[in-house]
Image (cartoon, helix red, strand yellow):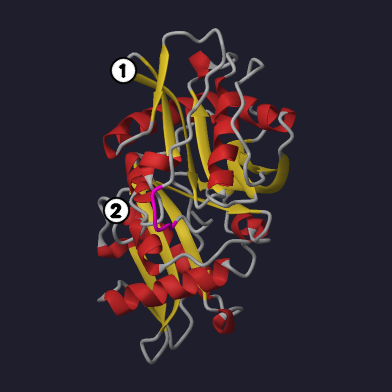
Amino acid sequence: MTATGTSSRTPAPVALTLPAGVGGLTTRPLSPGDAAAVTELMARCEQHDVGTVLIEEADIVGDWQRPAFDLATQSVGVLDEDRLVAYAEVYKARWADAAVDPDHRGRGIGTALSRWTRSVAARDGGSVVGQPVPGDSPGERLLASLGYRCLWTSWVLEMPAGTAIAPQPIPQGYAVREPRDEADLRAAWAINEDAFLEWSERERATFEEWAATVSMRPGYEGWQLRLMVDRDDEVVGMAFVIVSSGCAYVDKLAVRRDERHKGLARALLVDAFEVGRAHGGERSELSTDSRTGALGLYEKVGMQVTSVWRHWAADVAPGHEAEPARGQA
């Protein structure tokens, strides 16, 4: 299998070897029916580590339905009888996610999951694998102790409920509307990918991969995708907003390179906040990271940092083998 996640044959699953002393726990690959359990596990971890829950089940479902992701060979769960207490996944031999229930930490499960993610990345042709973890958390301390390095910092920012959103008039000759057809969706995808690939070191996501977490995301409605169009009705910018539990989260925001410095991005952001509030999002959130240089822009519109995350990564080599887990992480 290549690092793109595609192959002419299905690779053999990588076994997760748990440390001695955790008898009674079992492991298996995850299935689509585990999405709710993974959401609950991640919610417990987020509440414990950052004091708030950011995840929702649609996030998991959207990620898992990306064409290049194979749950059977790129995920693993750890169960205490029927209860999921830890999990990990690796997408495209590069992007990992893992979580261990706070009640089961300190037993070496996190260390075992780290070895598993590196083994899966190596099997699938990767050279580096990493994941985001909350800053100053047990997960961050574990990855640092295992030789991972921090590649970038991310911030989650919030516009608190009741905060007045500074108006940003849409420049003359432009308008914001919903998508009408697949051509509009593909235009939004192209602008989104072009913008993020200016600073993100990854391969270009296909339209199908992008759509899995946007227009094919569970619960998607057209008003969530905001398109900035010029006087010829050509799409020049986009924003994608998700409303959940009273929060409007701006998941994507991008403007075509030749249309920047006209106030279009800020106009899209304000529009996304306003449409989010109209659909029940009393407060607004988004995230950005140190690769974009956009933190100051969001703070200037009144947003406040509520949590800090860092992306930690480790090198892997072809033929890397999972070893029996040691330690107490």
- The amino acid type of the residue labelled 2 equals His
**Residue positioned 31% across, 17% down in the render:** 82
On residue 279, the disc is 2
Residue 217 picture location, percent across and down: 31, 54
Q: Which residues are magenta?
A: 6-10
Choose the circle earlier in sequence order: 2 or 1. 1
Comparing 295 with 200, the one in front is: 200
Q: Is residue 191 above or below residue 240?
A: below
Residue 209 picture location, percent across and down: 39, 61
Q: Look at the image and tell me whether residue 316 can be seen.
A: yes
Q: On the picture, is 175 further left or further right than 304?
A: left
Q: Is residue 102 above or below residue 271?
A: above
Residue 229 picture location, percent across and down: 40, 82
Q: Which residue is mark 1?
A: 82
- The amino acid type of the residue labelled 1 equals Asp
Q: Main secondary structure of the magenta part?
A: loop
Q: Look at the image and tell me whether residue 168 can be seen.
A: no
Of discs 2 and 1, which sits in the foreground? 1
